[in-house]
Structure formats: C-alpha cells, structure tokens
Amino acid sequence: MNEINLTKVDLNLLKSLRALLEEQHVGRSAKRMNVTQSAMSHTLSRLRDVFDDPLFIRHAKGLEPTARALELSGKLGFILGEINTLLAPKTVDMTQVHTHFRIQTHDFIVTSYLAKAFKTIKDKAPNIIIDVQLMESESYAKLENGKLEMIIGAGLMTSPKFMQKRFTNESLVCLLDKENPVLKNWSAEAIFRCPHVRSSLLGDKDDPITQYGKQNGLPERQIGMYVGSLSLQPALLAGSKLIAFLPETLAAQATKFYKFEVRECPFALPTLTIRGMWHERHQYDQVHKWIRDKISNSF
C-alpha cells in the first residue's frame, strides 16, 4: 500500500469522504456539504487519487463502497471526532482552577476600578488567589521573566512585544489645599513657583509637567516631595502649599476626606491611558483570558 502524502489531504476532503460513505450518492453528499454536484464529483476524484483506490463503484441507485472505502469508514469517525476535539475551544471550570495571579498596578486603580473585578473573580473562581503589588522599577522585567501575570497602568515604559489592551482614559487635574494662596493667581507661572508632589516612578522625560516647563521657558520646577504611591499624595497636601497632579477619580475621592480644591490645570496635560499589559505567552491561556475579561469589564 502506498504511503499517503498528508499535504494532499485537508479536513474538508475527509468530511466529504464521510458524507459519501454515509449517503452513498454524489448528489445527496453534495447537498450535505453545501457544494454543487460537479464539485463533489471533483472531490471524489481527488479522494481516489489520495487513497489510490476507486473507493466507490457507481450503480443505478448511487455508489457502492469498495473494500478500501469500508476499511476507511471504520476509522474516519474516530479521526474526525479527535480533530473536532482538538480544534474545539477549551472550556475551563473556573470553580476548579487553583492558581496564583500576580498583578502590579497603582493603588488608585485598585480602589477606583479593580476592587469590583477582584470580588467578581473571587465569587466565580474561589481558588484563584489574586496577588496585588504596587508598581516598581522592575515591573516590566518581572513580566518578561514570568514573575508577574499582568501589569495595569499607563504603560509608559512598556515594550512593544507585550500584549496590551486599553481599559479607560483618565484626565489629570491639580489637587491642593483650599487655603493654598496660589488659588488667587491661578496660572502656569504661579504653579511653577509652588512646590509640587511628584511620583518617584517617573523620570523627567516621562513627566508631562516637567516637560511643559522646559518647553515653555518656565522656572525650574520645584519638587517639594517625591512619593511612590499616588494614593498617598493627597494626605500630604493638607495645610501645605504643595500641588499634586493626579487622576481625576483619585482627586475626587480625596475631596471626600480633606478640604481640597480640584482645579483644571491652566496648561494642557495629556490624558492618562490605563491599560492592561501581559506577555504573549499568556495570550491564548483560557484562565488568563477569563481574568483579563473580568478586569476589563470593571472599567
């Protein structure tokens, strides 16, 4: 028996063979496969070439399978069944999944958006442990080497090789104490004469306020404090002359606890895009995708 060249076989060819075996009629097989009778006759010729056998003998009522065709019939159902199983979308019972999912993000993103998603995940998949960590300088290196499953943030220093999805946009606003004297003369020049709270995670080239001052000939920016956590910044403003530049949702939360003023910046600030980032190795992982979808739905 000649060895079959698999490059000559495709899935539709095998499905057509199954239809011919079950219908034993070219016309009915063509209708079942939603092709013309001429196309099915052509397919039968290809099948005969592939298997080096007539496969069917024509008679008045249709087709009679040869011994080789009958031999193939016994195996074909199993083979096509296995192929369907192989190609079928993987389903996962999330209640039975035990895994540790590590995320690095900013604290305000947790309080503003992610807390709801984490509750949904825990309700539907109680054995998934979400490990929430704050962003650090090594975040992207950890995503690369498998020590993180996801980063949620602005992605200013991310690599193009990581998969990304935009979740939402946040406006940046100025937050300051209601008694801050700069409120009486709200201008870019006055703001640059006041001390600022700045994120210690941003370098000068990624900091829009610093870049605006350099590009517009303003006095060198005064940094009153560096803080690694955005959510800690509001507590440092009370009774001071400090100004913080924060996402609008975080600034709104802060006004519920402190006597703060939220002001639109007198010069244009870029929109803060919050996105999820993950390594391409997880792109088609069903559990990872399920968690990503739940997180995305919370924004």
Image: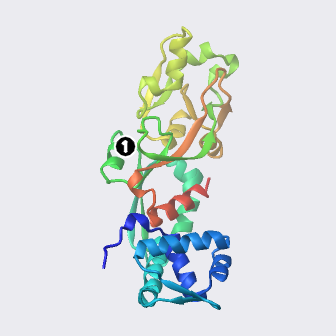
Farthest residue, direction top: 217
Estimate the x, y position of residue 48 in percent, counting from the top left: 46, 75
Estimate the x, y position of residue 81 in percent, counting from the top left: 47, 82
- Image vertical order of residue 235 relative to residue 220, above or below: below
Name the residue nearer the viewer: 234 or 51.
51
- Splitting the image into 4 quarters, where does residue 192 fall? top right
Residue at image coords 49%, 61%: 289
Is disc 1 placed on a helix, strand or loop?
helix
Estimate the x, y position of residue 96 in percent, counting from the top left: 44, 78
Local crowd at mark 1 within 10 Å, few (<14), some, or many (≥20)?
many
Name the residue nearer the viewer: 136 or 296.
296
Residue at image coords 53%, 25%: 208
Estimate the x, y position of residue 68 in percent, counting from the top left: 41, 87
- Image vertical order of residue 246 relative to residue 141, above or below: above
Q: Is residue 88 visible?
A: no
Q: Is residue 295 visible?
A: yes
Left or right of residue 15, residue 136 in this image: left
- Image vertical order of residue 241 relative to residue 218, above or below: below
- Image vertical order of residue 258 relative to residue 121, above or below: above
Q: Which residue is mark 1?
A: 140
Name the residue nearer the viewer: 290 or 36.
36
Residue at image coords 62%, 16%: 188
Q: For the residue marked with disc 1, what is the amino acid?
A: Tyr
